[in-house]
Amino acid sequence: MELLQLQYFLEVARMEHVTEAARSLHVTQSSLSKTIQRLEEDLGVPLFDRKGRKLRLNEFGSKFLRRAERALFELEQGKLELSDLSSPEHGTLELAVTTASTLPDILREFRKKLPDIQFHVQMLSTQEMAALLHRGEVDFCLSSPPIQEDDIECQIVFIDPILVAVPRGHRLADRSIVSLTELRDEWFVGVKRGYGTRDLVDSICRSVGFAPKYVYEGDEPARLIKLVEADIGIAFIPSTARDSREQIKYLQVENHELVREIALLWHRSRYISRAALEFREVVVDYFGALSKLTN
């Protein structure tokens, strides 16, 4: 059994399509198919049910997938550990976020401490982030909501009130506090379903008897403030993402019933480099200082 066979098997298992997997791996379809066939011959069982170019893991493949993922995961962790031991002041930190509003300040503080460490950041949905965490492909995730899984460590770092942003000319603009039920007839701008804050807000609004009506749904949270300012709709905005524009007024939700948890996440078995440990300390210190300011 060869390492290349395992790598190809994992990609085909994820894609469930020969053409797409071959494109992702930058190899020909025939080369990929032959490699998978040799692996199945070595194991003595078929790993996929085939229908044209589409493949689906069968019972054998599903069981072997967990072992293959674990084997490649451990090899990757060994590579990371050796790299860290040989060059602790260099390297790349792999990060993923569902909430990005605090990230510039956090990365600025981290860069002051370790200026030679690079970082690669992905903005993902909760589902996409969970997949990367399970595969051990990121050092840390900053997520709202938290992800609770057996192989994921979850540290809540901040309780973030969600505010209501309205334009200055809005009927509620002279208020500082509003109840959720007062918003049932409003039009909203927001991010798409699948983003943590959107799903949380929709769920809590339903619990008090209404579903927010969205005139705009996008995948760029930073754009919402401009839409509110243009009087397209009002928005639920986490306090950490508020913008000090003069034409926007932020209202607290009555009884503080709308808050989100921001969590730092990492795979329990992933090797944590010295740079990653430093990053975790920066995140915890940053949100600790922010909590003191808001309390």
Image (spheres, helix red, strand yellow):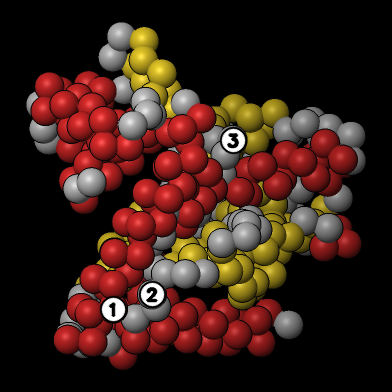
- Mark 3 lies on a secondary structure that is loop
Disc 1: CA contacts within 10 A as few (<14), some (14-19) or many (>=20): some
Give the camera-side residue of 161 and 215: 161
Is any part of residue 203 visible from this angle?
yes
Res 214 → quadrant: top right
Residue 244 lies, with reference to residue 281, above or below; the image says above
Residue 17 spot, x, y in % from top left: 31, 22
Q: Indicate the amino acid at tag 1.
A: Glu
Q: Indicate the amino acid at tag 3.
A: Arg
| Residue drawn at 32 percent across, 37 percent down | 43
Disc 1 marks which residue? 81
- Mark 1 lies on a secondary structure that is helix
Pointers 1 and 2 in contact (CB under 8 A)?
Answer: yes
Pointers 3 and 1 in contact (CB under 8 A)?
Answer: no
Name the side, left or right, on which 106 lies relative to 21.
right
Disc 3: CA contacts within 10 A as few (<14), some (14-19) or many (>=20): some
Name the side, left or right, on which 33 lies relative to 268.
left
| Residue drawn at 19 percent across, 48 percent down | 2
Query: Disc 1 or 2, which lies upstream in sequence?
Result: 1
Query: Which label was assigned to residue 193?
Result: 3
Residue 185 spot, x, y in % from top left: 79, 30
Is any part of residue 230 visible from this angle?
no
Give the camera-side residue of 272 and 203: 272
Name the side, left or right, on which 38 lies relative to 105.
left
Query: Which label was assigned to residue 271?
Result: 2
| Residue drawn at 63 percent across, 49 percent down | 197
- Mark 2 lies on a secondary structure that is loop
Query: Which label was assigned to residue 35?
Result: none
Residue 75 spot, x, y in % from top left: 29, 64
